[in-house]
Image: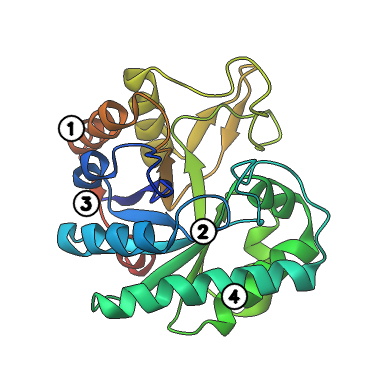
Amino acid sequence: MPAIDVNSDLGESFGVWRMGDDAGILPSVSSANVACGYHAGDPSVMRETVRLCAEAGVAVGAHVSYPDLTGFGRRNMACSPREVYDCCMYQIGALQAFCRAEGIALQHVKPHGAMYNQAARDRFLAEAIAEAARDSGDGIILMGLAGSEFEPAAAAAGVRFAAEAFADRAYLKDGSLMPRSVDGSVIHDAAAAAARVVLMASKGKVIAGDGTEINFKPDTVCLHGDTAEAVDMASAVRRALAEAGIDIRPLREVLTR
């Protein structure tokens, strides 16, 4: 049976402020990208999110970001590769401690927001993130945009790479994500998102915003956890994959099949 990982960005609450329904999304995903306090989350939220993931049997990854709580990590920053490496190491180490306390291993590292988009195009930033994943040990996987600078960076660092696609984000014809400032960049229709994921997983294709057919075979598909329809969309994607005969497995299992 073909298999794919389904991931979601979780643990994005902060203090008394709540973001998303993590408990509602967890039954539909196989991996979670847990915020590490730089764009969202705090120590208590990190601990509770890791605990929920461990109980649900969902693999945990570090969702590393620029230090930008005010901008939710979505504002570009002029950080050097060394600064990006240090930021990633700091966040990965913090989440690893909570994972160890729950008796689970950290599965992957995925950059968030502006760091993700800038590094997808910048080889030196991508290499800094890949090196942080490598130096954190435990065979951590680097998750990044399919067809981007993340893949050669992972190869250069000697870490496994997981090509990621997005169920709820529109694409440009070059395979990059449509900027959030553009109307239609975020997909809110659960049925449409589910159909896109099945096409990605079964045919290795996605249709860009201008109608261009983009060819790539993702190892994992992301569902954002910060939209109003996140839980319904996650459920719809899981049902559609099951109906198409596609198994949902954590990333480590997908990459070894």
Q: What element carries label 2?
A: loop
Which amino acid lies under the numbered mark 2 shown in the image of this protein? Answer: Gly
Report if the CB atoms under discs 1 and 2 are less than 8 Å apart: no
Picture layout, residue 70 above or below residue 214: below
Give the residue pinned by disc 1: 243
Sooner in the amino-acid sequence: mark 4 or mark 3: 3
Residue drawn at the location 40% of the way across and 40% of the way down = 17
| Residue 37: image tag | 2
Find residue 94 and report its horizontal and vertical position in percent.
47, 73
Q: What element carries label 1?
A: helix
Residue drawn at the location 26% of the way across and 26% of the way down = 232
Give the residue pinned by disc 3: 1
Which amino acid lies under the numbered mark 3 shown in the image of this protein? Answer: Met
- Mark pair 4, 3: CA separation: 36 Å
Within-10-Å neighbours for mark 2: few <14, some 14–19, many 20+: many
- Mark pair 1, 3: CA separation: 12 Å
Sooner in the amino-acid sequence: mark 4 or mark 1: 4
Q: What element carries label 4?
A: helix
The answer to which of 97 and 242 lies nearer the viewer is 97
Sooner in the amino-acid sequence: mark 2 or mark 3: 3
| Residue 89: image tag | 4
